[in-house]
Amino acid sequence: STEMEKQIRANINQKLVESGEKERLKQMLRSRLVECGWKDQMKEYSREVVKNRGDITSEELVAEIRPYARDKVPPQIKAELLARIRKFLSANAAGTVTKTN
């Protein structure tokens, strides 16, 4: 990505953090992933990887399960998260920050 894109991403992240919205989004994501069984699915998948690979570091385990874990996030949860980020950005672009709970 270009320098301008990096700067835009950094600015958005800063606004999300300063407003507390990033933490609210993380909490929403955590609860949705538990509700849909994703967390349990990832625990089971991790156990299988460890069983099959044997000696594996936590870094290697994370690197191995990350693509699978991202792929297994249900589309409706991804869509909800994206909608909340868009709502935050449009509110922020107007110069106001609203809590989206």
Image (cartoon, rainbow, N blue to C red):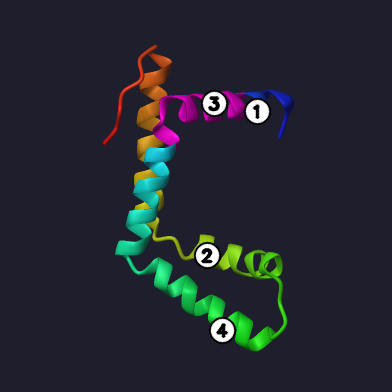
Q: Earlier in the sequence, mark 4 or mark 2?
A: 4
Foreground mark, 1 or 4, reads 4
| Vertical position of residue 3 compared to residue 40: above or below | above
Q: Is residue 88 left or right of residue 58?
A: left
Amino acid marked by disc 1? Glu
Q: Secondary structure at mark 1?
A: helix
Quote the CA–CA distance across marks 2 and 3.
Answer: 26 Å
Q: Which contiguous range is marked in magenta? A: 8-22
**Residue in the picture at 33% in, 55% down:** 31
Say the numbered circle drawn on residue 5: 1
Nearer to the camera, 73 or 23? 23
Say the numbered circle drawn on residue 69: 2
**Residue in the picture at 39% in, 51% down:** 29
Q: Residues within 10 Å of mark 2 (few under 14, many from 20)?
A: some
Say the numbered circle drawn on residue 14: 3
**Label 4, on which residue?**
48
Q: Earlier in the sequence, mark 1 or mark 3?
A: 1
Q: Earlier in the sequence, mark 2 or mark 3?
A: 3
Nearer to the camera, 36 or 31? 31
Quote the CA–CA distance across marks 1 and 4.
Answer: 38 Å
Quote the CA–CA distance across marks 1 and 3.
Answer: 14 Å
Foreground mark, 2 or 1, reads 2
Foreground mark, 2 or 3, reads 3
